[in-house]
Image: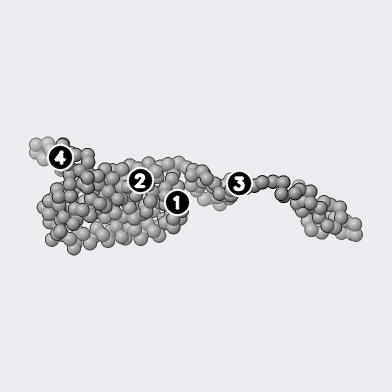
Amino acid sequence: MSNEDYRPASSGGYRDDGPFPRSGEDYSGSQPTSRIDPSEFDDSGYSSESTDLLTSSSPIEDEVEQELGKPRWHSGADLGLLVLRLVLGGAFLAHGLQKVFGLFPISGIKLSPEMMSQSLQASGYKQPELLAWVLSLTELSAGALLILGLLTPLAAAGIVGVMINAIADHWSLGFFGQISATGAVTAGWELNFVLAGAAVALMFTGPGRISIDRPLPWYRKPIPFGFLCLVVGVGAALLVRFVMKS
């Protein structure tokens, strides 16, 4: 269809305000005649915002993003991040519950901050009682926050800080661990490395839209907040490592 204007320019031609009449106007006469009464429609039940957590964007936005060659965010990414948060957060929440409340005993033995302080003291840490409570509460709170998707980058920073020191403490055992002459296996720092990497990933991806963080600033700008919280996590780990250890 041609876009050229074939309207007659002489007197009596169409009005010079466009090739078609405005909404609600008639061709005849110089004044618009309303054909639709807006009061007949009740739009109070409609909203311009989507209420579906898994709805990524409007069809128009999707079409524009495709034309520009930009990758679209999809609901599968949200579900994947939810699974990652539940697995990582659930593991640390369980360890926190073990240490703080004595749940999930190992071989019938209930863990406690007192037992953790003895282990930390044997590893050469100063003020082991304080560090035991800090470690236990960090695992407990970070795990719970990740599950909820609340303060996600800060919770991930807590996990990174704990894992850096765990890797440093087990560094001599190697990545895969060691096997004694009797066949006993001592775990290395492989698992700690994987958990720290998963936490760093959540710092920069954000928690996904199935989270409490969704309306908060670090959800909309995950990269700068991710870098900031990574510095916090690494800084806390170095502080414990070089200040709290003899």
Residue indicated by mark 1: 214
Question: What amino acid is at disc 1?
Answer: Arg
- For residue 112, side relative to residue 36 (left or right): left
Q: Dot 1: within a 10 Å radius of its alpha carbon, few (fewer than 14), some, or many (20 or more) residues? A: some
- Amino acid type at image mark 4: Ile
Please tell me which of labels 2 and 3 falls first in the chain.
3
Would you name the residue on which mark 2 appears? 147
Residue, x 79% and y 58% (percent of image)? 17
In the picture, measured across the screen, residue 138 lies left or right of residue 45, that is left
| Total count of labels | 4
The residue located at (37%, 57%) in the rendering is: 226
Q: Amino acid at mark 2?
A: Ile
Q: Position of residue 170 (x, y in %)?
A: 18, 50
Q: Which mark is residue 61?
A: none
Farthest residue to the bottom: give it. Answer: 243
Discs 3, 4 touching: Cβ within 8 Å: no
